[in-house]
Amino acid sequence: MPSGIPAPRSHDRLATVWFSVTVRVAWDLMLAGIRVRPAILQDARDHALASLPEGAGADEAEILAGAATQNYLTRVRDGQYHRLTDVPDTDLVIHRAWRESLFLAVDPVGDAVLRLHYGDGMDMAAVERTAAIDGTLLLAAQEGIRELVREIVESAEIDGWVDARVDGLIHRIVGMSASGCPEPIHLLSDAMRSHVDKCPRCSRAVRLIRGGVIAPLDLVAPGGETPMKMSEVAAILLHPDARKHRKRVVRALGPAAISAGHDSWLLSRADLISVGPELRALTEDAHPPRHQLRGAVVTGPGRWSGTALLGPVAIQALDAARARPWSEVDELGELPAPRPPPPRATWWWVGAGVAAVASALVGALVLTPEAPPPATPIAVEFKRIGSDWLIRFDADEIAVVDVVSVSVDGLTLLHSNVSAGKGRWATGQGDFELLVPGSEVALIASESGIPELLYLVGQSRGQPTPMLALQNWVKTAHPSVDFVASPAIIKGDPAVPVAKPPKPGP
């Protein structure tokens, strides 16, 4: 973006951007209380450079490097991954005359505020301690500086700006570099002293060098373009409702994954493929269910450094994961549905008993002319709506209702042991209504529920006609229940007959 400042002589764009970003990153790290070791400077600078828009000049790069440094610290210290804070008005052309007019118009107190607060980035409390000036005077000077800038810029638009936005503009005006900046290796020479005194960027660089924070060679750009390498990164997201499963997800992802927030993780594509079986096993056990996990893999500029991922690729991966449907993870495909829960040992004995009772009852039924009437009869009306069944039914208040369905996942117990809870299905006309997905559905009404129903559903899933098998098993073991199944669907005929068993008697 244009800034009204000529490029330093004898520097190409990459060299000036490198210089300005290095100075700004090192300065902001120092103000944050960070010991600026070479590895930290390299990481923070690489993150800032990778975050710049293409073609950014030295002045825009310096502004954005400040936001990128704070973003870097948030990642490495807090493990939080956010977008870079927007810096407003970077396209506004800054004129050198504004800076000269501003410094000429202020008194010594205002000069201290300009140089220490807006120039060096100190907070007002630090300015009060450093300059030994009363805080009330400093705040009054700051308000006066804001009004001066509104007059100097001579724009009707700026009159409506809030103080924070005006402060951002003042930071840019005060921080304008002078023209003709020397090569980094000449910064400390006596010949450059006059330039350094009037150039905020070079002044910061000299103070950083003399303070031992950086070395002159840190300001020299390597030859050629130095873009951050491309990395394949995966992001995994956990639904907030599944936070009770978070520890299991962390164990499955293993040490290669880093936290990018309470419900999100980042890892390499290779590591995701490696831990894929563990993630699939989690959803098969419903810890968490598959509809509470999703993930994506993207390729973008980024670099792993310790427990942090630098560069824009982290946000790109998280954004891509948020766009994926729940239960889908790139490279792993759609996650598997939960397995049926294994029956408890007691149910094996129940099954054996059921089989024995069934055998006995089958023999008895041959000799029995008519089955006993249901203890809790229900009247049911089935209506096909798309791929669902609209079920309207009437049942005794004391009846316990179970609802089963046959869908792509097989025979499933959708609603279990519903008694007083039937009220949520009430139509207001003395009966009940609910919508159930599946090709076949059935309502089961009993006096006190069927303890082994879940086991029987699991056993019936493997039968050629699971709903008929379940009906036979239930009616054999519990002849007093009422089992009403939906009518058969005739392929190619959308009209489905309505089943209306007799209404229960008084």
Image (cartoon, rainbow, N blue to C red):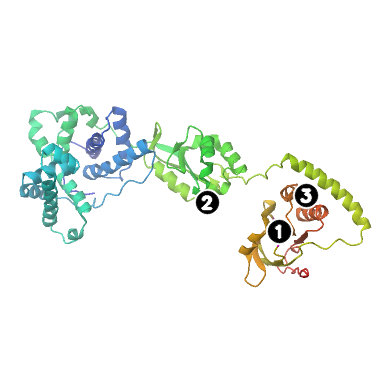
Q: How many marks?
A: 3
Left or right, 76 with reference to 147: right
Within 10 Å of disc 2 (Cα), the crowding (few <14, some 14-19, many 20+) is some
Three-letter amino acid code of the residue under disc 3: Gln
Vertical position of residue 433 compared to residue 352: above or below: below
Q: Residue at x 50, y 34 (%)?
A: 271
Q: Which residue is mark 1?
A: 400
Image coordinates of residue 363 in percent, x first then y, are 91, 52
- For the residues marked 3 and 2, what is the alpha-carbon distance in whole angstroms? 33 Å
**Mark 2, secondary structure of its residue:** loop
Sequence order check, earlier mark of 1 and 2 = 2
The residue that mark 2 highlights is: 325
Residue 404 magenta-highlighted: yes
Which one is in front, 165 or 482? 482
Q: Residue at x 63, y 67 (%)?
A: 426
Between 305 and 232, the residue placed more toward the observer is: 305
Reading the image, the residue beneath label 3 is 463
Left or right: 397 in relation to 474: left
